[in-house]
Image: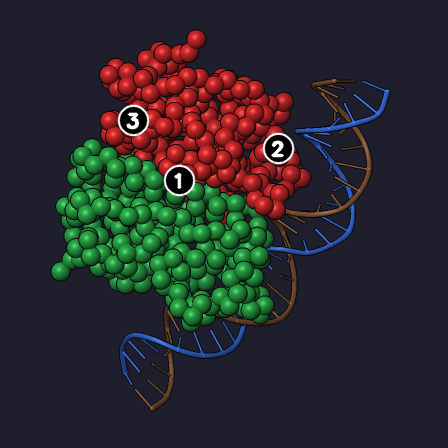
Chain colours: A red, B green, C blue, D brown
DNA sequence: CGATTAATTGAACCTGGTCAATCGGAGTGG
DNA sequence: CCACTCCGATTGACCAGGTTCAATTAATCG
């Protein structure tokens, strides 16, 4: 049994732009099914031509890029509402891999109908451009974090970013949220060594700025952490949901 | 006197996807004029709401993001064919600044007509998504360069990237191209200090892998530099031109 | 119970940052 | 024409943030 778009629990979050019932209907018709995967599953693979597009309904994942040296760069962390596979649709093939880190449920759309869908529903096509622009925006921020900040700062920044996204999705309770990632994931996201990642997290814990252990991230004082991250407090950015 | 889109010299480059005459006509109608700026001019400013969109016709520029610490991160280098201002159109305001580094000529479109244009010409809307996806792709590559590579490697990578883009645009003659950027620009792009940037460039010059001085970049042996960059040789990616 | 994976800690080392000084070219005013 | 200034490039010395190597603990799994 798949979820009806109009009853999609995500759509109720005010992180997402409102849509008319008619608009939701058209998306419902575009929807081809649902995909449920276990942690560790690869949903999209770099270099492949994905026949499908997905919207994350629930669960967390990771988007990464493998270098041909064997290293990898984690591009970002995937949250419910994220739309993936667009690159393959538009550029021929995926240039990064998407992996689940928790059980995930994804909304599936057929790539073959994508172009037709865009043509018939320019508002949705516009939304996709919108989502791309947001993605681009965040990548720019990430670049600045890696390029211009110290390990402590960028770690603080990354945790803030995850936490705030989680908060906007109602995943935070009592200033705690589940973080199913490993320190290796975080290290590869920030371009730090695993060892230094561990020590940096230790420092944040010691100073009681961010406590992450046993898959739970606890941030007692958001403002304090934001200060370390040298990150201006910013309201979550409204985004479209497909 | 502005250039007619159908006679646009850029369109002849095979870096750009072909269009029918009718398609070019519609773009011509969307075109609102041309903007010519001197080196150093700010074309778009972070935080502002740009009333216009631009396609770079000629000249080189830089896209950067200022941190509120005073540091800056150079996001990428702008080349002819790049489309800028989309973010402001779609997200309300610019999140980076665009500055000219040579005299530049830009094709101007009115933001107010943007939505209407998208709706009437879904193929163009699709192209914009396409361009966003390409941009996103390159940002991912950049992230990997900053995060996973040594200074020497990422410098080699950056020079390769610029050079290859230049080559695809016919800006390379005799394995040389004009590079109007400063070492500070490059340092801020790669997250290196100015001093180390200088020394790294010195090393590349010494090894005769990449010689950059007096605004001219000379790469005697592409494959050798690519090897240092640990970058697989890749054909320039076809892209739409608006 | 051995095997595997993630987290943790210590120590040695090195890449790249910081500080500081110099040089050369372009522009400017006297 | 010269002195002065400004900016980008260049170089040396010193230092620290982060990497690498190595070993240990803890938890999960067949």
What residue is rendered at 31% in x and 31% in y? A115
In front of the other: B29 or A101: B29
Q: Residue at x 41, y 38 (%)?
A: A92
Please give the chain letter of the residue carrying mark 3. A
Residue A76, above or below A219: below
Q: Which residue lies most toward the top here?
A: A1
Q: Residues within 10 Å of mark 1 (few under 14, many from 20)?
A: some
Task: Check the picture and name the quadrant holding the N terminus of chain B.
Answer: bottom left
Which chain's residue wears label 1?
Answer: A
Residue A177, given in percent of the width and then of the height, sits at 52, 21
Question: Secondary structure under badge 1?
Answer: helix
Name the secondary structure under disc 2. helix
| Circle 3 residues within 10 Å: few <14, some 14–19, many ≥20 | some
Q: Report if the CB atoms under discs 2 and 3 are less than 8 Å apart.
A: no
Pointer 2 residue: A183
Looking at the rendered image, the disc whose residue lies closer to the viewer, 2 or 1, is 1
- Can the viewer see residue A160? no
- Residue at image position (25%, 46%) is B19
Q: Secondary structure at mark 3?
A: helix
How far across and down, in percent of the image, does residue A16 sit? 34, 23
> Residue at label 3?
A117
For residue A91, the mark is 1
Q: Is residue B137 above or below residue B99?
A: above
Hey, which quadrant is residue A190 in on the image? top right
């Amino acid at each position: 049994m798949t979820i009806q778009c109009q009853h999609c629990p995500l759509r109720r979050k005010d992180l997402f732009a409102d849509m008319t019932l008619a608009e939701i209907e058209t998306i419902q018709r575009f929807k081809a099914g649902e995909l449920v995967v276990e942690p560790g599953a690869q949903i999209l693979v770099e270099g492949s031509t994905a026949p499908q597009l997905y919207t994350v309904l629930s669960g967390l994942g990771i988007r990464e890029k493998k270098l041909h040296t064997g290293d990898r760069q984690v591009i970002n962390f995937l949250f419910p509402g994220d739309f993936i596979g667009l690159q393959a649709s538009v550029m021929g093939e995926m240039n990064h891999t998407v992996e689940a880190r928790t059980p995930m449920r994804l909304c599936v759309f057929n790539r073959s109908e994508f172009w037709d869908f865009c043509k018939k529903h320019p508002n949705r096509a516009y939304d996709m451009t919108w989502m791309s622009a947001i993605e681009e925006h965040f990548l720019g921020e990430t670049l600045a974090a890696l390029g211009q900040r110290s390990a402590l700062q960028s770690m603080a920044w990354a945790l803030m970013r995850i936490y705030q996204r989680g908060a906007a999705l109602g995943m935070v309770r009592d200033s705690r949220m589940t973080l199913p990632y490993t320190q290796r994931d975080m290290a590869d996201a920030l371009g730090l060594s695993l060892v230094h990642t561990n020590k940096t997290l230790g420092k944040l814990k010691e100073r009681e700025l961010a406590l992450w252990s046993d898959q739970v991230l606890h941030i007692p004082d958001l403002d304090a952490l934001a200060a370390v991250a040298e990150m201006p407090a910013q309201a979550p950015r409204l985004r479209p949901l497909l």
